[in-house]
Amino acid sequence: MKRIAQLFAFVILTLSGMASPLAAQSNMPPAPYAYTQLDDPELEETARELMYTLRCLQCQSQSIADSDAPVAGDMRHQVRTRLAGGESPEEVRAYLISRYGDYISYEPEISATTWPLFVLPGLLVLIAIAVLVRRVGKARA
Amino acid sequence: MKQLRITLWIIVAIAGSLFALFAYQLSQPKDEFVRSAMVGEQIPEFDLEPAFADRPGLSSADFANGEPALLNLFGSWCIPCRVEAPQLEALERQGATIHAIALRDREEDVARFLSAYGNPFTRIGRDDISEIQFALGASGVPETFVVDGSGRITYQHIGIVAEGDIPVLMEELRKAGSGS
């Protein structure tokens, strides 16, 4: 058991060593609202919620709230300033989708390509109920 | 009994086709790029300050002068941008007008970058907070758009402009010039 733990630690250490440092990505300080919260705590909360559902352009498996990439900081600046400017979270999301397509948003949406994901589970439940009803009916008869 | 057997085979077939689908999808190369949804759309409104002293700044109005042009996004801190610099110069020599936006950059760094790797750009605007990058739907640097004479984006090239991309971009420019 101890040996497995050691092996595991070894693998983790090797992997983290392999991750080379990223090249410099910017010469400029981050945008004003990349790391600065909005003064209004309620609006900041809305902004954070939205940021967790937007994809970072650079580290595509992270949200812009999670990512430390400069571009994610600039996207957070966009989110915060747009919300502070009176836009609703869904308007900000729609703006980004209009520029990058659905991929930028983590929020699942029903569209021409995704509707089977929403319809199929319901269909399967219906089939299961039908089968069950028939079996129970047969058993009683 | 026979009906049960058929049902079992149907289940096997469904499972089999699912695995075939997984195998197919897993063997497809992953497209890492987030493409712009602005291709085919009018270039967004912007008006950027000059990125350094020797070239004027860039606004969306500069693209609506009847002539198609390239719009290149770069940064002096971006290493692939150095790699594509000779190809941009080749494009300029072949008659392409190239405007640029320097992302998150300082004036002295831009000047140093251009004196070291060449300056094929007619106008260079500065975008300190990536605002116009987002408006263009650009995924990062380097990136090159083709914009027609009426200011409509007709083509997006993501990543380094390699040797083989030069004829492609020249052809896209020609199409943009004749189409509008």
Image (tube, rainbow, N blue to C red):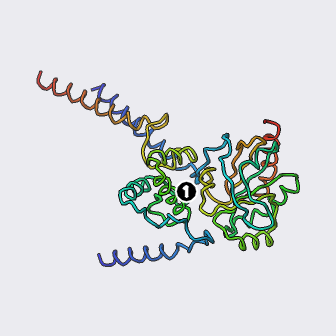
Residue at x 45%, y 45% (from the top left corner): A90
Three-letter amino acid code at disc 1? Leu
Find residue B55 and report its horizontal and vertical position in percent: 79, 63
Kind of element beneath mark 1:
loop
- Relative to B151, is A3 above or below? below
Q: Is residue B15 left or right of residue B99?
A: left
Q: How many marks?
A: 1
Q: Residue B8: which quarter of the image?
A: top left
- Relative to A124, is B22 above or below? below
Q: Is residue B101 left or right of residue A1?
A: right
Q: Nearer the viewer, residue A15 or B136?
A: B136
Indicate the chain on which mark 1 is placed: A
Residue that carries the numbered disc 1 in the rendered image: A57
Q: Where the C terminus of chain A falls, by quadrant?
A: top left
Residue at x 75%, y 71% (from the top left corner): B113
Find residue B107 and report its horizontal and vertical position in percent: 71, 70
Residue B24 makes an appearance in the image = no
Residue A54 makes an appearance in the image = yes
Q: Nearer the viewer, residue A120 or B42?
A: B42
Q: Residue A52: which quarter of the image?
A: bottom left
Q: Residue B132: which quarter of the image?
A: bottom right
Q: Nearer the viewer, residue A106 or A118?
A: A106
Label 1: how many Cα within 10 Å (few below 14, some 14–19, many 20+) = many
Q: Where the N terminus of chain A falls, by quadrant?
A: bottom left
Residue at x 24%, y 30% (from the top left corner): A129
Find residue B2 and report its horizontal and vertical position in percent: 30, 25
Find residue B45 and report its horizontal and vertical position in percent: 66, 48
Residue at x 37%, y 57% (from the top left corner): A45
In the displayed orientation, state which residue is furthest to the top.
A141
